Image: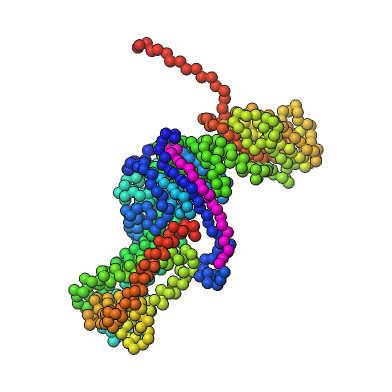
Amino acid sequence: MNAEVQTPPQVRPQSLELREVRGPSATGGGNRRFFELLWLISATEFKKSFHGTAFGYIWSLVRPLMLFAVLLVVFTRIVRFGSEVPNYPVLLLFNLVVFGLFQEGTGAAVGSVLAQEGIVRKTQFPRLVIPLSSVMVALFTMGLNLIAVFVFILFYGVDPMWTWLLLPVILLLVFVLTCAVSLLLSALNVRFRDIAIIWTVAATVLMYGTPIIYPITFLEGSFLKDILLGNPLTLIFEQARAWIIDPTAPGAVSVAGGWLNMLPAAAIYVLTCVLGVWVFKREAPKIAERL
Amino acid sequence: MSAQPVVIEARGIEKSFRLPVNKISSLKEQITTFSRPDYRELHALRDVSFDVHRGEFFGIVGRNGSGKSTLLKVLASIYAADSGRVRMAGRLAPFIELGVGFNPELTARENVELNGVMMGLERRQARSRLGAVLEFAELEEFVDMKLKNYSSGMLVRLAFSVMIQSDAEILLIDEVLAVGDAAFQQKCADVFHEMRDSERTVILVTHDMSAVEHYCHRAMLLHDGELRAIGDPGEVARKYLRLNFESAPSSGVDSLGEVADIVVEDAWLEDGDGQRATNVEKGEELHFCAELEAKRDVEGPTFGFTFANPDGVEVIGFGVPLEDLPERVGAGQRIQIRSKVENRLAPGRYVVRCWIHRNRNISDIVLYSPHILDFVVFGKDEAGVAFFETEVEFELKRGESQ
């Protein structure tokens, strides 16, 4: 090695104005840096999930497809309620892929801050990037899977509808909730390491507690329906069914039985988001010490 | 140096950690522990205030647990201070250790870009640094290799290169010198020497007093979270050593014990007044003393000592003169060796090595102990491993052309 030191490229001039150092925070280091980091880390993580495997992309499809195949056989051949639901196979596949965003996003995020211990303890790094990039990876995966889903939907014989244009609304609602839950879980997991274990169970419960593999109309008259109506994901998925798969399906408002009955779920949704952001913001400065 | 503007201003920084006596890290424990858990308050920093000027190479020294690293983490926005404030001018490298933030699954190219973005560069700027970084690290051929396949030496080179090729004006460095092999440390040393004279501000946390005296313009000493001294690095290093040896009086006696026929029982330094000393000032009188004990009879023993500097170079070697040596030493006899050494040693840490042979034959080794004592020579540094009185004359002759 030669010993001479090249002067580093002075891209930016030094400002000599003293500025307050505010300590660690969720987004510390400026907005542009935050988004650049979020994008770069999410993109590389996403690419990484394909590297080293011969059928990288195929594998990300195989998981929901396997689950789909099993459930399809169970509910159309064994339990047989699937045959009463119009377009059941495409509904099931669509639901599984969109729910995958929530499930995989939160599942990866919950342990993410703990896993990035080195970065958190040794660098000044916007903490928020860590769980959010996990969600972003799940979002990219879902985006790719959705393409396959829509090919399947068309192939199955569902006619394109103008309400398909409302798909982004559905996805945005799921995405925001996923982010909020991810923030909440990843911050709490630093304090209580068993959150991650509990969450794997809770996420499965949530999957059955959301009308993914069955439409909520099956629970008509049962107290279970009232419980499910408190789950914001219930209304989102019911609305998606009406918009994307089956225009004759009731949609969120009539499933809930009027606008007023949607309030609890909406309140829980908003509360989760506020709580997630609040808890993460509160915990962020202390994360490095607690690890 | 103080003519330069202040770039780091720390005022009254306090930081304490509440260490739970039993750490609660699961929900069940939280729920089942009805009484509030016991905490032990650890006051890591107490009212620390200081300024660092632009272009300064500033050392922070202190014993383990003195709060050095905590302070660095507060400066780097990794920890939040409980009170007090820090103000800073200029861009700070967000890393405090080499190689953090590297992702072993990514290639060097991707990691350099990621690192640049972490430094606050735009992605295009981050990519444009790649060439310079790799050139300095001499890793151009491995640009598309994943870091997990790098050797540790290559990794350190890349990390170091990323750090110094960044455009951060303020670098915070925690014990970087401990990393890498001798050749790499030499490279670090060269770079630090250059950084010392550059516009960049460097804060170096270290245990290595010779590094402090070598590179730093100023230094400060932390002890139990308090600022004990700030200013001249030599002075600070001396205070640190005094502090260190007050509570750990004997150190460095290391011999091959049972196997040898003669063992080193004790080794120490004395100053000009015959007082035991743990370190000496540059140029000051130096007495090296050792007490040995013969475990078995040894015929025709010879005794030799060398002082080796941190690079392993044996700067001086000396022995007991032949005419003073006994024909034999008997089992159980004690030997005391006192030597006066003309102290031309350059400042730094030295290790004393000891050789004992029998039959006046240097290939017949009774004892070789590579480390019977270490000590520090403190003082202002000049080039070289030793210093000599020199007389230099300078004359400007008028050229014919005038």
Percent x, y of residue B189:
48, 38
Looking at the picture, does residue B79 appear above or below residue B134? Answer: below
Residue B83 sits inside the magenta stretch: no
- Asked if residue B39 lies in the magenta stretch, the reply is yes
Question: Is residue B187 shown to the viewer in this render?
Answer: no
Would residue A211 be seen by someone viewing this image from the given angle?
yes
Q: Which is more toward the observer, B235 or B248?
A: B235
A215 sits left or right of A284 in the view: left
**Magenta highlight: main SS:** strand
Measured along the vertical axis of the image, is residue A198 above or below residue B228? Answer: below
The N terminus of chain A appears in which quarter of the rendering? top left
Check the image and name the residue furthest to the bottom. Answer: A221
Whether B26 is drawn above or below A7: the answer is below
Q: Residue at x 51, y 46 (%)?
A: B48
The type of colouring in the image is: rainbow
Looking at the image, residue B129 sits to the left or right of residue B321; the answer is: left
Determine the residue positioned at 41% across, 77% down: A205
Q: Residue B197: where, in percent of width, then height? A: 43, 34
Question: Which residue appears at 53% of the width and 32% of the height?
Answer: B381
Quadrant position of residue A81: bottom left
Q: Quadrant of residue A64?
A: bottom left
Is B343 displayed left or right of B77 in the figure?
Answer: right
Query: Does A19 sit above or below residue B399?
Result: below
The tally of labels here is 0
Where are the magenta residues, as a range?
Answer: B36-56
Q: Position of residue A164 (x, y in %)?
A: 22, 73
Q: Residue at x 51, y 53 (%)?
A: B15
In the image, B94: left or right of A169?
A: right
Where residue A148 appears, as percent x and y from the top left, is 27, 70
Q: Residue A143 appears in which quarter of the rendering?
A: bottom left
